[in-house]
C-alpha cells in the first residue's frame, strides 16, 4: 500500500510540475533508488559505528536471495547474495559499557541516513531527485520510529528506546557480552569453554532469558535435547510476562529442540510433537519470519515421513540461514532426508557442507556415522 501511495504522489508532483508521463517514470526510478539506497546507507552507518565504538560484528550480508560467495576476514564473515540491493549486518555487544556503545552506533546510523536525505533535498532539481526525496524522506522518518521485532531493530529504537530501557531488559543487555562469548565458543566447537562461560553467566545473571538461552544452547551442542526442552518449558511456565519478541525466539527454539528430541528418541513423539508444532506456529504468529524456520519445518517433515518435502525445506533453510551452526544443522537434516530418499550420493554432498561448518555437532557426527554404515 505504501508503495502505491508513493508512486501516486510522485506522479502527482510531476503532473503539477509539468513533466508529464516521462517525468513520472523518471521520478519512479528515483523513488526506487531512494528505497534501496537509504536502508543501505543506514546499515553502513551502523556497521561503521559498530567497528568504531567497539561492538561485535559477526556477519555482513550484501544482497538478498541465494548465496553467491562468502569469505572470512578475522572473526567477521562476509556474504554476497544474488540480488545485491540490501545490506544486513549482524552486530551485538562485546564489552562494556554496552548501552552507550549501541547508542553511539545507532546515532551514527541515523546521521548517515539524515545526511543522505539532506543531500537528496539539495540535489532535487529534476524528476529523479524529486522521486528520490519523496521516497527517502518518509522512509527515514519510519526508521527513526522506535521499533523492535524478531530479527529487526530500528535505528529509532537504538536512539530513543534503548537508553530508557527498564529492567529486566536492561540487565539482558548488560549480560550480552558474556552471552556473546558463549556463542562464540560454540561456533568454534569449544563446548567446554562455552559451558564454563554459561556457568559464569548463570552465576552473575540468574533467571534472565539470555542466561537460559545460553544454557539450552550448550545442552543442544552436547546432544542433550530432552533436558534442553524441559528447561525451556519450565522457564516458559515460570515467566508469564515475556515480551512478544523474546517469546517468538523462545518458541522457535523450543520447536527446533523438540523436533530434535523426538528425532533422537529422547522424548516420545506423541507427547512432545504437538507441543513443538504449536510452538512453531505461535512463533510465526508473534512475528518470527516463517522462511527463517524452513530448517525446523524440514526436520518436522522428515520426522513425519515426508522426505521429499524435507529435502526442499532443508535446502531452503541451508541456503538462507546466516548462522553457521544453524546451517550445519540444516545440512545434516538435508543429508538425512536424502538418505530417506535413498540418494546417499546427495547425502554425502550435504554432509560435507555440514562438516565444513560444524564437524563437532552431534547431529552432524551422527549423520556421518549413519552414512559410513550405509
Image (cartoon, rainbow, N blue to C red):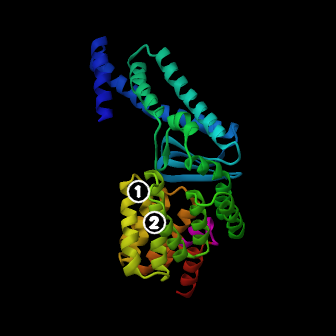
Mark 1 or 2, which is nearer the eye? 2
| Residue displayed at 57% across by 68% down | 354
The residue carrying pointer 1 sits among few (fewer than 14), some (14 to 19) or many (20 or more) residues within 10 Å by Cα, namely: some
Question: What label sits on residue 237 in the rendered view?
Answer: 2
Estimate the x, y position of residue 182 in percent, counting from the top left.
66, 60
Picture residue at 59% right of the left edge, 31% below the top? 107
Q: Main secondary structure of the magenta part?
A: helix
Q: Nearer the viewer, residue 43 or 203?
A: 203
Task: Answer above or below: position of 68 versus 117.
Answer: below
Q: Residues within 10 Å of mark 2 (few under 14, many from 20)?
A: few
Task: Tell me the distance, in whole angstroms, between the alpha carbons under discs 1 and 2.
Answer: 28 Å
> Which comes before the other along the chain, label 1 or label 2?
2
Identify which residue, 83 or 293, lies in the foreground. 293
Provide residue 162's location: percent of width, then percent of height.
56, 39
Please report contact status of discs 1 and 2: CB closer than 8 Å, yes or no.
no
Judging by the rendered image, the residue that carries numbered circle 1 is 291
In the rendered structure, which segment of residues is drawn in magenta?
Answer: 351-360
Question: Which is more toward the observer, 158 or 337?
Answer: 158
The label shown at residue 310 is: none
Q: Quick one: SS at disc 1?
A: helix
Using the rendered image of the protein, determine whether residue 18 is visible from the camera's viewpoint. Answer: no
- Residue 77 visible in the snapshot: yes
Question: Where's residue 61, x and y in %?
Answer: 55, 47
Quadrant where the N terminus lies?
A: top left
Amino acid at each position: 500500500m505504501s508503495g502505491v501511495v508513493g508512486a501516486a504522489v510522485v506522479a502527482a508532483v510531476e503532473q503539477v510540475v509539468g513533466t508529464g508521463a516521462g517525468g513520472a517514470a523518471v521520478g519512479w526510478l528515483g523513488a526506487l533508488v531512494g528505497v534501496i539506497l537509504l536502508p543501505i546507507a543506514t546499515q553502513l552507518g551502523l556497521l561503521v559505528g559498530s567497528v568504531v565504538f567497539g561492538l561485535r560484528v559477526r556477519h555482513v550480508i550484501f544482497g538478498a536471495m541465494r548465496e553467491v560467495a562468502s569469505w572470512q576476514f578475522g572473526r567477521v564473515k562476509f556474504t554476497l547474495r544474488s540480488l545485491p540491493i540490501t545490506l544486513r549486518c549482524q552486530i551485538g555487544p562485546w564489552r562494556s559499557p554496552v548501552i552507550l556503545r549501541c547508542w553511539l552506533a545507532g546515532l551514527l546510523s541515523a546521521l548517515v541516513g539524515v545526511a543522505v536525505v539532506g543531500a537528496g533535498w539539495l540535489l532535487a532539481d529534476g524528476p529523479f531527485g524529486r522521486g528520490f526525496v519523496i521516497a527517502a524522506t518518509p522512509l527515514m522518518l519510519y526508521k527513526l520510529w522506535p521499533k523492535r521485532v524478531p530479527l529487526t531493530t530500528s535505528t529509532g529504537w537504538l536512539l530513543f528506546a534503548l537508553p530508557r530501557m527498564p529492567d529486566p531488559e536492561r540487565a539482558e543487555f548488560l549480560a550480552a557480552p558474556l552471552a556473546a562469548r558463549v556463542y562464540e565458543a560454540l561456533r568454534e566447537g569449544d563446548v567446554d569453554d562455552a559451558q564454563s562461560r554459561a556457568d559464569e553467566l548463570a552465576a552473575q545473571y540468574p533467571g534472565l532469558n539470555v542466561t537460559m538461552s545460553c544454557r539450552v544452547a550448550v545442552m543442544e551442542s552436547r546432544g542433550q535435547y530432552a533436558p534442553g526442552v524441559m528447561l525451556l518449558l519450565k522457564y516458559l511456565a515460570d515467566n508469564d510476562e515475556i515480551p512478544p519478541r523474546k517469546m517468538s525466539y523462545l518458541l522457535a527454539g523450543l520447536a527446533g529442540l523438540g523436533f530434535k528430541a523426538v528425532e533422537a528418541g529422547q522424548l516420545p513423539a506423541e507427547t512432545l510433537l504437538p507441543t513443538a508444532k504449536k510452538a512453531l506456529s505461535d512463533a510465526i504468529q508473534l512475528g518470527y519470519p516463517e522462511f527463517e524456520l524452513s530448517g525446523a519445518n524440514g526436520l518436522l517433515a522428515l520426522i513425519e515421513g515426508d522426505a521429499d518435502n524435507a529435502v526442499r525445506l532443508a535446502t531452503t533453510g541451508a541456503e538462507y540461514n546466516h548462522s553457521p551452526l544453524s546451517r550445519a544443522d540444516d545440512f545434516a537434516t538435508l543429508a538425512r532426508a536424502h538418505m530417506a530418499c535413498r540418494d546417499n550420493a546427495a547425502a554425502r554432498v550435504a554432509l560435507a557442507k555440514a562438516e565444513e561448518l560444524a564437524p563437532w555437532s552431534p547431529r552432524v557426527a551422527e549423520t556421518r556415522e549413519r552414512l559410513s554404515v550405509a
